[in-house]
C-alpha cells in the first residue's frame, strides 16, 4: 500500500520560511516522480512543483518559482519542499503526491498558514 505522510507545516509570518517533508512507503520511491500540490481555502488543487525520480529534473509553478525549492533523498524515501519568502497567499494545505503502478496517491496534507 502506498503511503505518503507530510509534515512540517505551521503558522509563520510573511517573509519567513518553512520546510515540508513527505515520507513515502509502499513503493520503490527512487523509481517515481514526486510532486507537491496545495489547496487554499475555498479553492481547487494547485500544482506547485515536481521532481524527477533521480532528483535532477525539477519544475515549478510560476507562483512559487524563485521562492520554493523541491528536493528528495532516495536513500530515506523523503521528498522535501523548502519554502522561503512566504506570502499570505501561500496559505493552504500542502500535499505530496505521486503516480505509481498502483495509481495516483496523495497524503493527508499539512497545513501552512502565513499571517501576521
Image (tube, grey):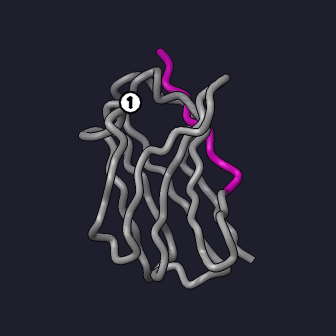
Please state the extent of the stretch shown in magenta in the rendering.
Answer: 107-116
Residue at image location 65% in from the left, 61% down from the top: 5
Left or right: residue 61 versus residue 89 is left
Left or right side of 101 for 78: left
Task: Residue under label 1, please give it.
Answer: 86
- Image vertical order of residue 74 relative to residue 87, above or below: below
Total count of labels: 1
Assess disc 1: are there few (<14), some (14-19) or many (≥20) residues with their C-alpha within 10 Å of its C-alpha. many
- Residue 3: image location, x then y, percent: 69, 69
Image quadrant of residue 66? top left
Q: In which quarter of the image is residue 43?
A: top right
Looking at the image, residue 44 lies above or below residue 4: above
Q: Does 52 appear above or below 65?
A: below
Q: In front: 46, or 115?
A: 46
Q: Above or below — where is 88 with respect to 64?
A: above
Say if the magenta span includes residue 73.
Answer: no
Amino acid at each position: 500500500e502506498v503511503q505518503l505522510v507530510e509534515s512540517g507545516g505551521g503558522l509563520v509570518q510573511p517573509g519567513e520560511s518553512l520546510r515540508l517533508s513527505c515520507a513515502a512507503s509502499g513503493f520503490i520511491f527512487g523509481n517515481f516522480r514526486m510532486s507537491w500540490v496545495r489547496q487554499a481555502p475555498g479553492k481547487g488543487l494547485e500544482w506547485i512543483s515536481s521532481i524527477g525520480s533521480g532528483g535532477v529534473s525539477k519544475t515549478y509553478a510560476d507562483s512559487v518559482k524563485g521562492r520554493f525549492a523541491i528536493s528528495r533523498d532516495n536513500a530515506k524515501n523523503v521528498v522535501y519542499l523548502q519554502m522561503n519568502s512566504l506570502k499570505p497567499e501561500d496559505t493552504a494545505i500542502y500535499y505530496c503526491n505521486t503516480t505509481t503502478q498502483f495509481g495516483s496517491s496523495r497524503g493527508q496534507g499539512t497545513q501552512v498558514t502565513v499571517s501576521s
